[in-house]
Image (cartoon, rainbow, N blue to C red):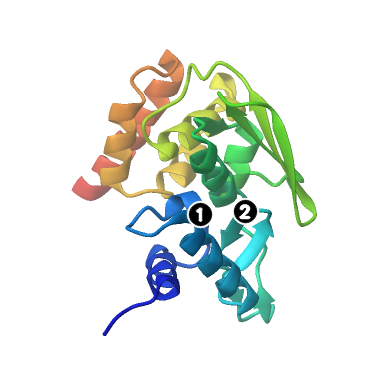
């Protein structure tokens, strides 16, 4: 059975799971750009994907409680824009805490530091902001950047065991081990907190 360009594009989208945000540049398999663009336009028109802004889409999640599609995931949207333009990004502290659900503060502006140009995007009733900066803390894995910024936002003097325990539950011990290896260039006290999280998880396994 021969699959159409649209079928191939949709298969990749579904494989990434609900909530994934993407642009035409995320489809690099033996398809011309015009076929990808046409496929995305058709899928959006059919309601199988959602257009977030010009040239950017997501595979929306549906809430059975709210009986509607939930708003686009701002972090995945930021990552999709960064991939599209080849930027390296990492969130500011409040954005990272909000992503992990560790902040009671509602964030109307999601801010990311970037080695690309400063730009702003309106996503529904929220604002996605990229601020140009020298990305000294850029890391190989996006999870590491999120963790570093979340810990930095709390501050060395305000870090508690409860905070570290809550943060430790956001990833598996294998992911935390990878994060620790990736965070070796982080500020000393931040790296120490990441090491403590790995120790907490290991103690939990042994206990």
Q: Quadrant of residue 43?
A: bottom right
What residue does disc 1 label?
24
* Neighbour tally class for label 2: few under 14, some 14-19, many 20 plus, Cα within 10 Å: some
Q: Residue at x 58, y 26 (%)?
A: 116
Would residue 13 appear left or right of 130 to someone viewing this image? left
Residue 118 disc label? none
**The residue tagged with tag 2: helix, strand or loop?**
loop
Q: Nearer the viewer, residue 144 or 188?
A: 144
Residue lying farthest to the right in this orientation: 125
**Of the pair 56 and 142, the residue shown nearer to us:** 56
Q: Quarter of the image for the N terminus: give it.
A: bottom left
Instruction: Tell me the distance, in whole angstroms, between the alpha carbons under discs 2 and 1.
Output: 7 Å
**Residue 157, x across and y down, in percent:** 57, 20
Q: Is residue 207 visible?
A: no
Up the image or down, 64 lies above or below 179; here it is below
Outermost residue to the left? 206
Residue at 58% over, 68% down:
60
Report x, y in % for residue 73: 60, 56
In terms of secondary structure, where does tag 1 sit? helix
Question: Is there a contact, CB below 8 Å, between mark 2 and mark 1?
Answer: yes
Badge 1 density bin: few <14, some 14–19, many ≥20, Cα 10 Å:
some
Image location of residue 192, percent across then percent down = 38, 22
In this rendering, would 174 be left or right of 14? left
- Height in image: 22 above or below 68? above
* Residue 78 seen in the figure: yes
Q: Which residue is mark 2?
A: 55
Q: How far across and how far down the image is residue 129, in percent? A: 70, 36
Residue at 50% across / 54% down in the picture? 24
């Amino acid at each position: 059975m021969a699959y159409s360009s649209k079928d191939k594009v949709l298969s990749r989208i579904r494989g990434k799971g609900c909530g994934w945000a993407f642009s035409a540049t995320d489809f690099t398999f033996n398809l011309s750009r015009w076929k990808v663009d046409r496929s995305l336009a058709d899928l959006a028109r059919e309601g199988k994907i959602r257009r977030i802004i010009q040239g950017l889409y997501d595979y929306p999640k549906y809430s059975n409680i709210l009986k509607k599609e939930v708003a686009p995931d701002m972090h995945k949207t930021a990552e999709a824009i960064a991939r599209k333009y080849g930027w390296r990004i990492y969130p500011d502290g409040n954005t990272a805490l909000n992503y992990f659900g560790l902040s009671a503060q509602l964030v109307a502006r999601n801010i990311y530091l970037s080695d690309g140009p400063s730009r702003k995007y309106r996503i529904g009733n929220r604002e996605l902001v990229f601020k140009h900066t020298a990305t000294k803390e850029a890391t190989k894995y996006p999870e590491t950047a999120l963790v570093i910024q979340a810990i930095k936002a709390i501050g060395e003097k305000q870090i508690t065991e409860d905070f570290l325990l809550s943060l430790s539950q956001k990833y598996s011990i294998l992911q935390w081990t990878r994060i620790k290896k990736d965070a070796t260039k982080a500020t000393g006290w931040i790296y120490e907190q990441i090491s403590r999280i790995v120790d907490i998880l290991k103690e939990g396994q042994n206990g």
